[in-house]
Image (cartoon, rainbow, N blue to C red):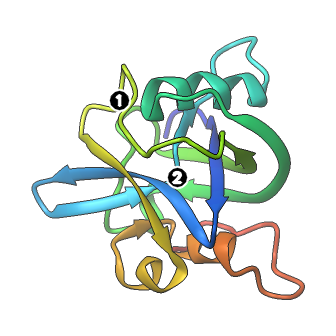
Amino acid sequence: MGGIRTAARALIVRRGQLLLNHYRDGSGDWYTAPGGGQGVGEQLPETLVRECREEIGIEVEVGRLRFVRDYIVADHDFSYLSEAAHQVELFFECTVPEDYVAQNGPDPDKKQVDVIWADAEALRVMRVYPARLAEAVEPAPNAAVYWGSGD
């Protein structure tokens, strides 16, 4: 099964909407929070700053850790991973300047077509990974910090 990959993801919420990377593949459109794999010797906030600069074209300010997720490919019908079968994803609250306009950065992921803002209602009907991302916009009281390997 190979090693475990560590990734950092940015939860950027503004005016009740979450910023998402928009991807397209053979099965259609899907969305996830900006971010990606941690490099050797790189601290997680550095990973987020680099990944967001590449994918959404802006340097984010990294805040507190909100959620941790084990993404084990064997537990899912769909995988956005190509180089690992198990990824630990750490979701951090991040901010962007108020005048930031959602757009692809200079080095987006291969299947990334756009960057969008989506509210909690839209997140519940979109093909978004993980499906629980609506909790970033509408946090439940006593929400779990550890999401396991579920959707």
Which dot marks residue 108? 1
- SS type, badge 1: loop
Q: Which residue is mark 2?
A: 33
- Residue 58 higher or lower than 87, as above or below: above
In the image: residue 110, left or right of residue 62:
left
Q: CA distance from mark 1 to mark 2?
A: 13 Å
Which residue is rendered at x = 46% and y = 44% of the image?
Answer: 85
The residue located at (83%, 51%) in the rendering is 65
Name above or below for residue 10 compared with residue 123.
above
Which residue type does callout 2 highlight?
A: Ala
Q: How many numbered marks does the figure carry?
A: 2
Q: Amino acid at mark 1?
A: Pro
The reply to whether callout 1 and callout 2 are in contact (CB within 8 Å) is no
Give the residue displayed 28% in from the left and 50% down from the top. 23
Q: Nearer the viewer, residue 93 or 9?
A: 93
Q: Position of residue 104 (x, y in %)?
A: 35, 35
Q: Residues within 10 Å of mark 2 (few under 14, many from 20)?
A: many
Density class for disc 1 (Cα within 10 Å; few <14, some 14-19, many ≥20) is many
Q: Position of residue 24 (x, y in %)?
A: 20, 52
Q: Is residue 121 left or right of residue 78?
A: right
Q: Is residue 57 above or below residue 18?
A: above
